[in-house]
Structure formats: structure tokens, C-alpha cells
Amino acid sequence: MLEVTKDEMDVLIRLQANEDARNKIKSSLNKIPEQMAVLDKQLAEEEQKMRDRETLSENQKKQYRDCEAEIKQRQESIKKSDLKLMSIKSNKEYQAVLTEIEDLKRQIGKLEDNMIKLLDDLDEAEKHLADDRREWEEEKSRLEEEKQDLEEQRQQEEERLTALDDEWRKIAEEAPKAVLDQFMEVRGNIAGGKAVAEVRDYVCQGCFMNIPAQMYNELHTTNILRFCPFCNRIVFVNGNHKEQ
């Protein structure tokens, strides 16, 4: 059995507290890439929505330009037909060309009606598009700000982790080799690496099992390094270790 002084046990408790703090930071750091990915996905989705709205507006403008081009094409056809009328001698052919001209004029009328509707749709779309762009810029700014906050958090957490790593090494220097070796061995054998656990009211805070009453009493009265019989962690009762 390994004997430890109160100061030596306190070193192990401080080492464990340091590791608990480091593990908490590591857990936080591990979540940041996933949080970043979520924000990136939201940014991409919102940007795609904005592009879809702009594409819709561009398609409407293209439809309007296509109508203009078709009207111009039919107007040119009417001019050619008017010139053709001047050289036609057959009444039947003359009537056929007139019918063709009237049909072209009806087509132009329908295209003009469609252009009027498209103009109304475009005006409405442009109004909504302006609002959509403003909302997109606001959402983009919000999401990028969240990303910046996460990046700052990552930098701060990494700095804290580095400081805790330095602190761990300094604390470890205070422990006798045998005591530190025991700590490292237990840490290596325990899932999650938590080597030291407090006992409160007979309950090990590492595995939450009740330890035997005799061991609980010995934790108050002896300086022997004790281990939980269930999880094998080094156990202690806070503030009650006897001085040698």
C-alpha cells in the first residue's frame, strides 16, 4: 500500500481538477468544427435562396426581352407583307396576305399584353427582391458574426488549454514519482481518464457506487492511497486527510 501525505493527495486532487478543466475545454473545442459546419451550411442555403430569387427575376427580364424581340420580328414581317401587297395581282393571294398581317397583329397584341403583365410582375418582384437582399445581408452578417465569435472562442480555449498544460506539468513536479506513477497508471486504465474521485456520503463520485463503510472511515483516518472497489479510481474525502 502506498502512503501519501495530505499535501501529496492534494497534488493528485489538483492534477485531476486540472484534467477536468482541460477535458471540458477539449470537449468544447471538439464541438466548434461541427458548429462551424452548421453555420456554413446555413450560409450556403441562404445564399442559394437569394440566388434563386435573383434567377427568377432574371428569367422574368429575359421573358420580357424575348417578347420585345418577337414583336420586332413580327413587325418586320408585317412590313414585308405590306410591301408584298403592292405587287400582288391575285385577289385570293391578296386576301391571304391580309389575313397573315391580321394574324401577326393579333400575335403582337397578345405579346404586348404579356409584356404588360411581365412588367407588373417585374415591378413586384423587384420590390420583394430589394427586401430579400436586405434580409440576406442581415442574415449573412449575423451568421458571419457567429462564425467570428466561434473562431475567437476557439483561440481563447486553445490559449487556456496551453496554460492548463503548463500548469499540469508544474503541479506534477510537486508529486513524488511513485505517487505520480500511480496516478498515471490509474488514468491510463480508466475510461475517460478520470483517475481521482471524491467520496461524498459513502458514494464514489466517479462511478456513483457506495463504497464499504470501513473504507469510508479509513479515508478519514489513514494516509493510505485508497481505490474505489468498483471503478478502481483513487478516492478521497475532501479536506479530511491526516498530516504525517
Image (cartoon, helix red, strand yellow):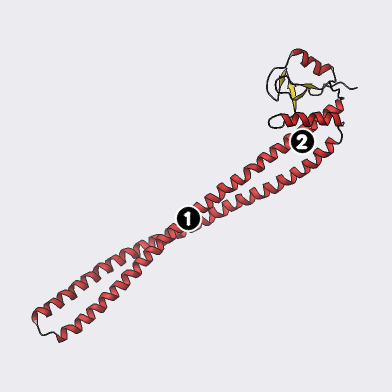
The percent position of residue 81, horizontal first and vertical second, equals: 20, 80
Name the residue rendered at 32%, 73% in the picture.
69
Q: Nearer the viewer, residue 220 or 114?
A: 220
Seen in the picture, residue 101 relative to 172 is either above or below; the reply is below
* Cα gap from disc 1 to disc 2, whole angstroms: 45 Å
Give the residue type that dot 1 points to: Gln
**Residue 152 image offset from top left, x and y in percent:** 68, 49
Name the secondary structure under disc 1: helix
Task: Say if residue 11 shows up in the picture.
Answer: no
| Residue 215 image position (x, y, % from top left) | 77, 15
Amino acid type for the residue under numbered disc 2: Asn
Single out the residue that lies furthest toward the left.
Answer: 91
Left or right, 173 with respect to 191, comes to right
Name the residue rendered at 34%, 66% in the picture. Answer: 63
Q: Which residue is mark 1?
A: 48
Q: Residue 52 in the image: state x and y as whole percent.
A: 43, 57
Q: Secondary structure at mark 2?
A: helix
- Mark 2 sits on what residue? 18
Q: Give neighbour class at mark 1: few <14, some 14-19, many 20+ (Cα, 10 Å).
A: few
